[in-house]
Image (cartoon, rainbow, N blue to C red):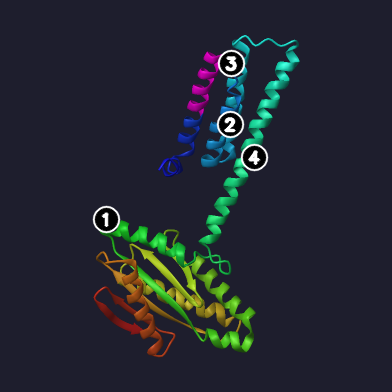
């Protein structure tokens, strides 16, 4: 619960929390006197801020923690035989806090990279099926709340197996990368393109009605055909296209319906677009 709350805060909010903790620790440190050390507790706000807001925010908090510790140490009456010893301790304290920032940021970056890789298709760079599922569920919830239309497309590569068999798997991988590039560069920023697995791709088009969705599907199909034609790969693209003007029962139901539309496109001659809505198929076109 606390981790989720912290994860939802802005960098400024996390920094403010960290500085508040540093201030609280400084007060406690001062009240207890220099004989009882609280230095190790300053690592908590430094590490917390770095983990939830990155090193660029953690370093200023590390500096604040160093200054707070130095202020407490000085005004609590801790006497040193030479001023340079105090300066050395301050520098050493900041160095330790900086190491904590570096280590924490390394862990944070590694975890973020793992989370990102777990939701990305390594071959095309597109979101994978898991990421598509998570993001589209959130989009469908938004559509249900605010009442806007959306469309989902399912793209299947016709002849992909023949490319693998005739040209080798390297050629098949190149086809997949071409498709990924075309999808990534021909959609709006708020649309979602993903590779579901194998030779299957999916698109989520937010606030796009049936007519607009069909135009997008035609544009994508044309761009895909042109891209693979440059490499002389004998493939085509069947597209199932579903528009939902009313909130669907579930994402699984949406995917089942659009999958049936794709199957209809392949059964009708391949390289076609078959469009429908939540009530049923509306028509087909090449």
Q: Residues within 10 Å of mark 2 (few under 14, many from 20)?
A: some
Q: Earlier in the sequence, mark 3 or mark 1?
A: 3
Q: Is residue 277 left or right of residue 110?
A: left
Instruction: State the separation of the CA atoms marked 3 and 4.
Output: 25 Å
What residue range appears in magenta? 19-34
Q: Residue 78, percent across and down?
A: 65, 11
Which of the two marks, 4 or 1, is nearer to us in this view? 4
Q: Nearer the viewer, residue 282 or 98?
A: 98
Q: Which residue is mark 1?
A: 145
Quarter of the picture holding the N terminus:
top left
Q: Which residue is mark 3?
A: 72
Tell me whether the residue at label 3 lies in contact with that at label 1, contact meaning CB atoms closer than 8 angstroms: no
Q: Is residue 223 above or below residue 33?
A: below
Quarter of the picture holding the C terminus:
bottom left
Q: Earlier in the sequence, mark 2 or mark 3?
A: 2
Q: Earlier in the sequence, mark 4 or mark 1?
A: 4
State the mark number for residue 110: none
Q: Nearer the viewer, residue 23 or 161?
A: 23
State the mark number for residue 102: 4
Instruction: State the separation of the CA atoms marked 4 and 2.
Output: 12 Å
Q: Is residue 45 left or right of residue 13?
A: right
Q: Residue at x 41, y 64 (%)?
A: 133
Query: Which quadrant holds residue 10?
Result: top left
**The residue tagged with tag 3: helix, strand or loop?**
helix
Q: Is residue 205 left or right of residue 63?
A: left
Q: Earlier in the sequence, mark 4 or mark 2?
A: 2
**The residue tagged with tag 2: helix, strand or loop?**
helix
Q: Earlier in the sequence, mark 3 or mark 4?
A: 3
Q: Which residue is mark 2?
A: 43
Instruction: State the separation of the CA atoms marked 2 and 1.
Output: 43 Å
């Amino acid at each position: 619960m606390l981790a989720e709350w912290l994860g939802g805060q802005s960098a400024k909010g996390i920094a403010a929390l960290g500085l508040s903790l540093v201030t609280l620790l400084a007060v406690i440190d001062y009240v207890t006197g220099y004989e009882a050390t609280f230095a190790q507790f300053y690592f908590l706000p430094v590490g917390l801020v770095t983990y939830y807001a990155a090193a660029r925010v953690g370093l200023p908090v590390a500096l604040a923690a160093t200054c707070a510790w130095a202020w407490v140490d000085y005004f609590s009456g801790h006497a040193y035989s030479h001023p340079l010893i105090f300066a050395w301790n301050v520098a050493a304290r900041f160095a330790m806090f900086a190491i904590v920032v570096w280590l924490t940021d390394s862990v944070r970056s590694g975890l973020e990279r793992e989370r990102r890789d777990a939701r990305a298709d390594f071959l095309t760079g597109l979101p994978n099926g898991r990421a598509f599922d998570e993001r589209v569920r959130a989009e469908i919830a938004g559509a249900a709340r605010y009442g806007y239309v959306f469309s989902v497309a399912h793209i299947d590569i016709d002849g992909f197996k023949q490319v693998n068999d005739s040209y080798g798997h390297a050629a098949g991988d190149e086809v997949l990368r071409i498709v990924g590039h075309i999808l990534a560069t021909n959609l709006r920023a708020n649309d979602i393109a993903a590779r579901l697995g194998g030779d299957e791709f999916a698109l989520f088009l937010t606030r796009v009605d049936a007519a607009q969705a069909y135009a997008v599907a035609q544009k994508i199909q044309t761009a895909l055909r042109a891209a693979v034609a440059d490499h002389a790969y004998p493939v085509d693209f069947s597209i199932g296209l579903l528009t939902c003007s009313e909130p669907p029962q579930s994402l699984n139901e949406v995917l089942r319906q659009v999958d049936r539309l794709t199957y209809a496109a392949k059964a009708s001659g391949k390289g076609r677009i078959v469009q429908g809505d939540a009530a049923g198929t509306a028509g087909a076109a090449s």
